[in-house]
């Protein structure tokens, strides 16, 4: 007799249905797993046998064959242990086989028969729900899976014995509750930053429209400090975004205790990061930092210190909002709709452009350092600002600075305006001006005549790329949204242009 249990194999953040077929038949004693298992799946043979033994179920002296169908889909990860074990228990008559047909099963087994947490419980639960099935998952993954919907039937046992007892009716498992991660309310606050008013304004604009931002300045001017205040002014994730973001974190195994939070991700990879770490890849094509920053912020501090190829790998996700990892026999796509915030010194010694400073290495110090960032990557950055050293007067007798809560309120209002506009225009799935398509932004952000004239002059003088032109429009649209204005005025266009032009070209033009 063949017992069948459903489970999933992950492709990106989607769970593809896998049919686990277990047959116990006379023949050479042993257990064999077929169906393109990777090393972790093949090793589940040992874990399953030990866990069943520990749960008091002796395997008969027969041949056990496990097939993971479809046979040509690679199976990766340790979550196949539990479906294989349940299939075997059903084949041996230890649990009724028909009840299993209502569930998708995932979980890793310990040798003592307890069930260990696995990555990907949330996407598995969402996949199971779409198929009209329930989910059997480890107890520790239950709170995460419960987010998939109130109507889905979830069993989250601690051990094989607890699950067998549930099916026998002697010990009923209760449905896990969705858990929320309590994050400390004390995020670093913008009020700590002295001076730097124009940098704070740029940070607010970037937060309001989801624009990419580059801060250039000497050491100790507060660039890292400014970036770390961004989470305190960003609005919370809405419900669909929360699920999407959590699915990626779930696949990456980064949901601690299966708890979700509505705070936007803020990822700060070190500049030694490899391409696989940043855009995804590695042994099991895991999501990279760019995907973990989905709907949030990817902060690259000391930008030129990253390897140039690694930085250029971000060009495609910055444009399309997703990372595609191509393998010889399949490709995996992870969403990566992030906002890039970067900080750098202007040159290696860090002081180029400071009044009274002359570098021993001459202008090469500046040009060589800045050349580490490619033109196309720079073209994708909408807002580039100088963050000069803090003035002594600001440090010694600072004026009262605005707290993050006030700025966050303005940002939320500007984002609400954007969302309403995209909804009335009938564009689904776009939340910020930065993500709006070029065709739509031309229709939605039309400057008044004097603004248009200014834009035309600037585009000619500074030779904006087509992308640059559209990005200026997007930033200007955000500036108007912050002002509560329906039409783009000259003042919005002018400010947007000033963010686009690197300061040295500005001074050369003056
Ligand atoms: N505007 C500021 N207001 C208050 N403190 C500041 C400001 N700028 C810098 N500091 C102080 O200087 C320290 C260093 O700032 P920060 O790390 O942000 O500099 P940075 O611009 O990132 O420098 P680097 O280029 O070396 O990375 C901060 O921890 C803070 O104590
Ligand atoms: Mg820094």
Image (cartoon, rainbow, N blue to C red):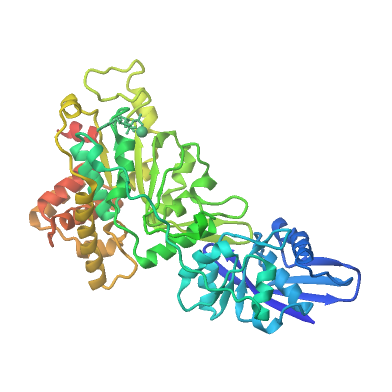
Is residue 431 visible in the rendered image? The answer is: yes
Residue lying farthest to the left in this orientation: 450
Q: List x then y, in percent, for residue 405.
A: 22, 50
Q: List x then y, in percent, for residue 315.
A: 42, 49
In the displayed structure, 403 sits above or below 247; it is: above
Classify residue 41 by image quadrant. bottom right
In the displayed structure, 217 sits above or below 441; it is: above
Q: List x then y, in percent, for residue 360.
A: 34, 15
Is residue 463 visible in the rendered image? The answer is: no
Tell me the quarter of the image containing the C terminus: top left
Classify residue 124 by image quadrant. bottom right
In the displayed structure, 453 sits above or below 365; it is: below
Q: In this view, does 322 lie to the left or right of 109?
A: left
- At x 23% / y 52%, what residue is drawn? 408
Q: In this view, does 183 lie to the left or right of 78?
A: left
Residue lying farthest to the bottom in this orientation: 98
Tell me the quarter of the image containing the N terminus: bottom right
- Ligand 2 - quadrant of the structure image: top left
- At x 35% / y 60%, what residue is drawn? 237
Q: Is residue 325 left or right of residue 475?
A: right
Residue lying farthest to the front in this orientation: 170
Q: List x then y, in percent, for residue 380.
A: 34, 48
Classify residue 131 by image quadrant. bottom right
The mark total stands at: 0
In the displayed structure, 125 sits above or below 403; it is: below
């Amino acid at each position: 007799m063949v017992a069948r249990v459903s489970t999933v194999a992950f492709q990106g953040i989607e769970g593809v249905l896998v049919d686990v077929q277990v047959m116990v038949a006379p023949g050479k004693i042993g257990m064999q797993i077929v169906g393109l298992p990777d090393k972790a799946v093949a090793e589940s043979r040992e874990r399953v046998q030990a866990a069943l033994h520990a749960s008091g179920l002796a395997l008969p002296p027969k041949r056990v064959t496990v097939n993971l169908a479809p046979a040509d889909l690679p199976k990766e990860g340790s979550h196949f242990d539990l479906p294989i074990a349940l299939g075997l228990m059903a084949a041996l008559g230890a649990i009724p086989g028909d009840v299993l047909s209502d569930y998708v099963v995932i979980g890793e087994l310990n040798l003592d028969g307890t069930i260990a947490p696995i990555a990907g419980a949330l996407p598995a639960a969402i996949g199971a729900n779409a198929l009209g099935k329930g989910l059997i998952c480890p107890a520790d993954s239950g709170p995460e899976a419960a987010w998939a919907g109130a109507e889905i039937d979830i069993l989250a046992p601690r051990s094989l014995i607890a699950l067998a007892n549930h099916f026998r009716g002697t010990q009923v498992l209760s449905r896990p509750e969705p858990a929320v991660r309590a994050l400390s309310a004390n995020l670093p606050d913008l009020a700590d930053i002295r001076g730097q008013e124009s940098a704070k304004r740029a940070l607010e604009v970037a937060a309001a429209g989801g624009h990419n931002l580059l801060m250039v300045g000497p050491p100790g001017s507060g660039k890292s400090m400014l970036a770390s205040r961004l989470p305190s002014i960003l609005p919370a994730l809405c419900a669909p975004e929360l699920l999407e973001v959590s699915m990626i974190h779930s696949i990456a195994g980064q949901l601690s205790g299966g708890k979700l939070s509505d705070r936007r991700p803020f990822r700060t990879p070190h500049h030694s990061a490899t391409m696989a770490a940043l855009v995804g890849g590695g042994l099991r094509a895991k999501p990279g930092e760019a995907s973990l920053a989905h709907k949030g912020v990817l902060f690259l501090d000391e930008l030129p210190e990253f390897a140039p190829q690694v930085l250029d790998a971000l060009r495609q996700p910055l444009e399309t909002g997703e990372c595609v990892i191509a393998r010889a026999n399949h490709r995996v796509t992870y969403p990566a709709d992030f906002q890039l915030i970067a900080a750098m010194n202007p040159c290696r010694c860090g002081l180029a452009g400071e009044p009274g400073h002359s570098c021993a290495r001459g202008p090469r110090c500046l040009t060589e350092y800045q050349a580490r960032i490619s033109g196309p990557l720079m073209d994708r950055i909408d807002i580039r600002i100088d963050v000069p050293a803090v003035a002594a007067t600001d440090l010694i007798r600072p004026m009262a600075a605005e707290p993050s809560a006030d700025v966050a309120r303005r940002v939320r209002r500007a984002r609400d305006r954007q969302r309403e506009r995209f909804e009335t225009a009938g564009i689904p799935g776009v939340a910020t001006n930065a993500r709006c398509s070029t065709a739509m932004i031309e229709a939605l952000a039309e400057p008044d005549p004097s603004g248009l004239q200014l834009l035309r002059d600037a585009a000619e003088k500074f030779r904006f790329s087509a992308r640059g032109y559209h990005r200026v429009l997007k930033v200007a649209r955000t500036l108007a949204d912050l002002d509560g204005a329906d039409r783009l005025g000259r003042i919005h266009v002018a400010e947007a242009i000033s963010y686009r032009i690197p300061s040295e070209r500005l001074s050369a033009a003056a």
